Image (cartoon, rainbow, N blue to C red):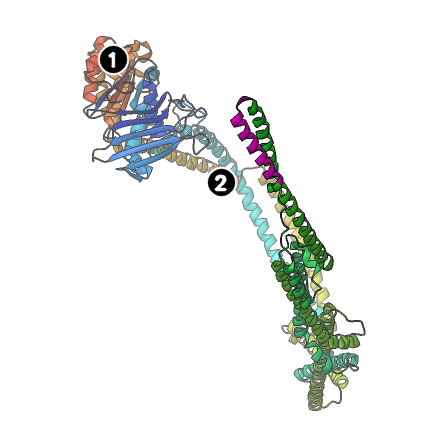
Amino acid sequence: MVKLIRIQIVNFGQFSNFTFDLSNSNIDVFYGANEAGKSTVVAFIKQILFGFHLANHSSDFFEDYKPLAQVSPMGGSLFFENENGQHYQLERLYAHGKGSKTGTLTVKCDNQVVPESVFFDQIKNIDGNFYTDSFIFNQDMLAKVDQIKQKDLLERIYYLGAANSDSLITLRDDFAKSADALFKKTGRKPLINQLLLEVKAEESKVSNSENEFSVYQELNDNFKKQKGLQHQEEQKELELQKEYDKLEKIQKLVPSYEKLQDLQNQVKTINFDSEQFQSAQTLTMQAESLHKKQQKIIAKLNEYSDDPEENTAVSKLIQKKPEVLQWQSEYSNCLQKDEQIKDEQNQLIALDPNLNKIVGMEQEEIIKLQEDYQKLPQKELKIGQSKNGNSKQYLLFGGVIFVVGLILLFIARAFGFLAVGMGLALVVFGSYQQKQTQKAVKIATEQNEKIRQQRQTFEKRYGIKPINLDINNLINEWRQYQVLIQNLKRNDQRKTELIGLVKPIAVQLGHELKQTVNTFADILNGLDQLTKKINLERLRREKQTSLENSLAENKDELTENETKLKMVLAKAQVTSLAEYEQIQKQKLKQDEIQNQIDALKTNLQNDLSELKSYAKNKTENQTELANLRSKISAVHENINHLQGKAAEIKVKMENLANSTAVFVEKQKLANLKARLKNLSVEYLADLFTAKWISRALDLASNERFPKMLVTAKEYLRLLTDNRYNNIEIDKKITVTRFDGKKIEVQYLSRGTSEQLYFALKLAFVQQIRDEINLPILIDDSFVNFDDHRVDEIEKLLQAIARNNQVLIFTAQTSLVDKLRIQPLTFKRGTKNV
């Protein structure tokens, strides 16, 4: 048994992340109201096992349980345990647009991924239709009890009993169909039936042909006599014709014999060696080729006759290119250095504009500038404004106290005099202070004017304002600038040296190239031109040397060739190839004569002796030919006469049935009988094979079908309380009532027909449990059962559960109570969910 122990739904229909843990017993009850999801769980179990059936997929048990919410993936897992204690997990998932619409199946055994076959081999690799028809019960399927056929049950049983049983069943049906097409007892269209009629008609035709044949034989004897006389005359004519043909053939060969004799008289012996002649021809052709090659080499050498010798001075000049490149690089560096020094000078002047006014001074002038600046007062004297301000304060304050004292003289005389005295004292002191201040201001003003004149003299002389002047920094900048001037001079000197170095080369290049050469680029370009020119001249000299060597080799070869040719001609005793060619022509002519002689001898070799005799007696042989022609003509006329008589007899014979016609009719009859025999053998073979395959399938399935019927009858008696006790299945299903009356399914009540359906399918499941033992799914299948029938079905289910796992999906509280099993519900948080 493969037992389902857990159902884990990821997304399917109205369920998301839902789990059912099944009990240890073989019966589990799923209880819930209508639309709670019972049929959804049934569909989930079937589709996880055998694949999703989406909107474009047809199935006998069609379900479309896409998740109600827009979630992905669709599917989940089933967990099984087999009799060996192995645990399997079947996970099937489907995501829109990814993979097959049947979903992606992953099979695990004890948490290890294994091939699908490891699990499905245990259930004989059945498909979803097999599982639906055999293990699922619901209201729609209960109504199809009248559609159960013996053939369908047998085929499912055979599927378990024999490998490739579906092919064997098809093969059995093909043999049975083939047998029916060959013969039927009351039929006329089958082939054997038609052949029986044809054999009877052909036997009548054979009898008529045999009567005509007796007359035909008499005429045939006379016809043979005439043909015998004709054959004798034809043999005589044939012998005369052979003699005539032989003599005529000799006569026709006489011209060829005479030509043979003439050719034999022309035969001469010519001494000619074809290999030596071929060697002479080859040497002559080689000599001609060598002469042509020599002329071409001389013509090319004439083109190189005025080539100048290699110029050593130019070669040395070209060798100076690396030095020029180095000087060019150094000159470029000098130019860059010029720009760099000038930039530094401009930066110094930009930082301090005063530097531009002293850059042309000498060292002594700079020293004098520094001394004159140091002699200048650095600051002007401050005029005593504070003291002047203080004196004004004393005068003002003393005046105020004096006025207050005058006022106090009228109020408090003592204080008035004191105040007047203090006021006068402050006024006198303030006047003194004011005079001293004015004197100091005058002195400071005079000194400041002298300082300004000194500064103006300094600025006029050097062009530099002394105020805020940093003389030390300015002198340092002058020193830096002088260093840059020295660097610039040294750089200019190096540029002059570099130009001096390349000037002789430029002059020499200009002379060689006859063009003006000034810049480094001109020099390098000129050196490249000279290099190219030197290379071209060297290449030409190399080609010239190569041609001179080739000419020398050619002369040697030509001398050797001429020597060999003279030796070959001397051996042939000729002086030239033309004379040798004349001998060759004579040889060819003699070869042609000999070939003709050989051909004529081949054609005449069997007749040469007779041709010699015929040539001696030409006239007598011609007379004999004429006599033979006369004899052949007379014999031929006699043959024509005998042929006419035979033709008359032949016409009479053609109107009668001859032995051939009798034979044809007999042969036709024999063929028909042979064909009848063969078809009869084929018919019996097809019929026997169909029955043999059926019996073999029965034996292979261990006679399951008869056993299944016995079990189904027992279940039906149990469910109907012995009201119905027998079942017959053929093209239609009939049941036998307790009173012996047979009733077809369509006349049974809905409840009884459903009980019959249960009996048949549960008996089938019981019969195949040793091969396939999967959970039985019963989805609200007892709504048409009364309480008594529910009691009976409960007993049957308990009996089935001893060997099979049963999952009941119901909305009936009474059934749950009768089964006395803690139900699984469809609410989260409840037990087992």
Q: Determine whether, in the image, residue 827 is placed left or right of residue 552.
A: left
Q: In the depicted view, which residue is nearer to us: 26 or 581?
A: 26
Residue that appears at 21% across and 35% down = 85
Q: Secondary structure at mark 1?
A: strand
Q: For the residue labelled by badge 2, is the local secondary structure a helix, a strand or a loop? A: helix
Q: Is residue 257 something that shows in the picture? A: no
Range of the magenta residues?
A: 411-431
Question: Residue at point 64% right, 47% down?
Answer: 440
Instruction: Tell whether label 2 touches label 1 (CB within 8 Å).
Output: no
Q: Quadrant of residue 734 in the image? A: top left
Image position, residue 793 (x, y; %): 22, 15
Image x and y of residue 283, in percent: 70, 83
- Give the number of callouts: 2
For residue 123, what is the image quadrant? top left
Q: Is residue 636 visible?
A: yes
Residue type highlighted by circle 1: Thr
Point out the frontmost of discs 1 and 2: 1
Most common SS among magenta residues: helix
Q: Of residues 69 and 265, which is closer to you in this image?
A: 69
Where is residue 772, by image quadrant?
top left
Type of the residue with mark 2: Phe
**Residue that badge 1 annotates:** 736
Q: Is residue 763 placed above or below 1 in the rendered structure?
A: above
Residue marked by disc 2: 663
**Horizontal and vertical percent position of residue 264:** 71, 80
- Horizontal side, residue 199 vs residue 651: left or right: left
Decide whether residue 414 is among the magenta residues.
Answer: yes
Name above or below for residue 192 compared with residue 38.
Answer: below
CA–CA distance between discs 1 and 2? 65 Å
